[in-house]
Image (cartoon, rainbow, N blue to C red):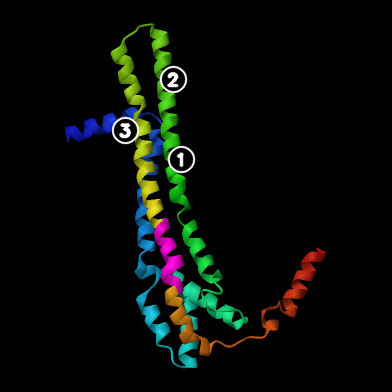
Amino acid sequence: MEMSENYFDEYVLQGGITMLALLPLSIYTLGIILQRFLDLRISRVMPQDLIEEAKGISNQQAFDSFRERLMLHSSPLAKVILSYIEAGERGESIHPDVNPTPIDDVMDRLYQSLSSLSTAYVIAPLLGVLGTTVGIMGTFEQFAIVGKRDMSALVSAIDKSLITTMWGLIIAVPAYYFYAIMQNKIFRYEREQFPRLLKNIMKNLVPFIKLNPVSSFEPSVTEQNHDALHSKR
């Protein structure tokens, strides 16, 4: 217990006021890493039950029921399949090699979900350097006031000032490492697994996708009147 208190005092309390930002940031970064790893598991990104259901559709009723389920499903695969179905209804290609836009749109959102992690590995070292700079400035100021040249005290004070730089790197290095791993994982989803899987799924769904008239995608008369009224205001 006494040893843990000594470590807490040496590596936290003596880091100064900047530790008030670095400690919460370290906990936040760890939480983000764990959450994103869970979100990017293949069982969440590409649920097996959804794949089996898509491949097993054999009639229009089953397709309509599946389409309704897609609208309520939160997985990236469900969003991509639904986007391809809607593209097919508009008369656009539903082949991933010809029309990769639905995959790209969903993958872009997955990439954006890592932005908080990239922010953490950028901010953490800067906060660490800021804390060290403030600590060294305070040390030199105290030595100038006292007027003594005690090198051991100076080295000890600088050592304490470097605590925040150490914490900044402790946060930044793992954050950058896991950010790179998760980016690579999303890239494999985007370029390998999703296109290969969707070729088979959309090949099975294409007989049930009904082409809707272009007019059904245009604003209704009510919406046009509503927009005209707002433009006049």
Q: Would you place residue 150 above or below residue 212 in this image?
A: above
Location of residue 111 in the rendering, given as x and y in whole percent from the top left corner: 48, 58
Helix, strand, or loop for circle 1? Answer: helix
Disc number placed over residue 137 in the picture, else none: 2
Which residue occupies the foreground of this view, 150 or 4? Answer: 150
Residue under label 3: 12
Type of residue at label 1?
Ile
Determine the residue located farthest toward the front in the rendered image.
97
> Decide: marks 3, 2 in contact (CB < 8 A)?
no
**Residue 193 sits inside the magenta stretch:** yes
The picture quadrant where one finds residue 51 is bottom left
User: In the rendered structure, which segment of residues is drawn in magenta?
Assistant: 183-195
Q: Residue at x 38, y 37 (%)?
A: 168
Q: Quadrant of the C terminus?
A: bottom right
- Gap in angstroms between the C-alphas marked 3 and 1: 18 Å
Q: State the mark number for residue 221.
A: none
**Mark 2 crowdedness (10 Å alpha carbons): few <14, some 14-19, many ≥20:** few
Residue bearing the label numbered 1: 123
Q: Point out the tag, 3 or 2, that comes first from the N-terminus.
A: 3
Specify the amino acid type for callout 2: Met
Q: Is residue 99 magenta?
A: no
The Cα atoms of the two marked residues, 3 and 2, are separated by 19 Å
- Residue at the far right in the pictured view: 232
Three-letter code, disc 3 = Val
Mark closest to the chain's N terminus, 3 or 1: 3
The overriding secondary structure of the stretch rendered in magenta is: helix
Q: Is residue 99 left or right of residue 34?
A: right
Mark 2 residue element:
helix
